[in-house]
Amino acid sequence: MPRLSQWLIRTAFIYLLLGFTFGALLLAHKGVPLHSALWGWLPAHIEFLLMGWIVQFTMGVAFWILPRYWKHPRRPNAIMAQIAFVLLNLGIWLVVLGTTFRAGQGVLLTGRIVEVCAIIFFVMHTWKRIVSREGV
Ligand code: HEM
């Protein structure tokens, strides 16, 4: 498995842990009120699980498994996927800052734009690797 996939998948598991922890706390809070500020973490729960876990895990597996080229570089433009990894995680935390930490609509919007850029960079890397075994 390439190094970038290891980073993406390990990071995704950290978000899974965080997301489930906040989900479990929120669920418990519905039965036995724990802390009034807890509902503020609902957007973080959603962000961690949808973008941090599902999207990031998918990117990790896709980078690994999509057809490679037999000559070097086997995964051309890998830098684009590396940039996507950085942007995705930056975007996630900007969204959490803009929602849970109430840093403002500007921060939230910037976070969303950064996330979209992450997807664009990942697609730019991946597009040419969507080919059959024969390479067409
Ligand atoms: C991949 C897994 C998960 C995803 C993508 C996910 C996503 C979401 C989303 C989108 C919402 C907002 C729903 C809405 O506003 O209508 C939500 C709410 C919630 N989630 Fe999760 N969730 C996941 C797993 C979990 C787990 C494992 C738990 C508990 C252990 C949990 C507990 C909650 C609770 C308590 C709410 C608030 C429900 C309410 O509004 O009353 N979630 N989740």
Image (cartoon, rainbow, N blue to C red):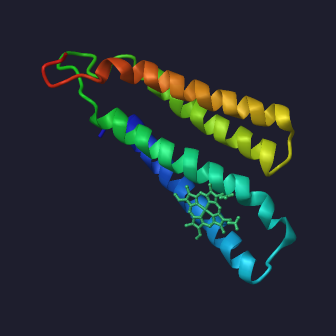
Name the quadrant containing residue 19: bottom right
Name the quadrant containing residue 105: top right
Name the quadrant containing residue 6: top left
Lateral position of residue 1 relative to residue 81, left or right: left
Residue 79 in view here: no
Residue 21 in view here: yes
Question: In this picture, is 85 found above or below 35?
Answer: above
Lateral position of residue 55 relative to residue 62, left or right: right
Percent from the top left, x then y, of residue 1?
29, 40
Count of marks overlaid on the render: 0
Which residue corresponds to the image point at 12% horizontal and 20% vertical from the top-left? 134
Percent from the top left, x then y, of residue 77?
39, 17
Question: In this picture, is 7 found above or below 114?
Answer: below
Lateral position of residue 129 relative to residue 103, left or right: left
- Quadrant field for ligand 1: bottom right
Which residue corresponds to the image point at 66% horizontal and 35% vertical from the top-left? 91
Percent from the top left, x then y, of residue 65?
28, 36
> 101 or 135: which is nearer to us?
135
Which residue corresponds to the image point at 36% horizontal and 33% vertical from the top-left? 63
Residue positioned most to the bottom: 32
Percent from the top left, x then y, of residue 69?
22, 20
Which residue corresponds to the image point at 57% horizontal and 32% vertical from the top-left? 86
Residue positioned most to the left: 134
Question: In this picture, is 39 found above or below 92?
Answer: below
Lateral position of residue 70 relative to residue 105, left or right: left
Specify the quadrant that holds the C terminus.
top left
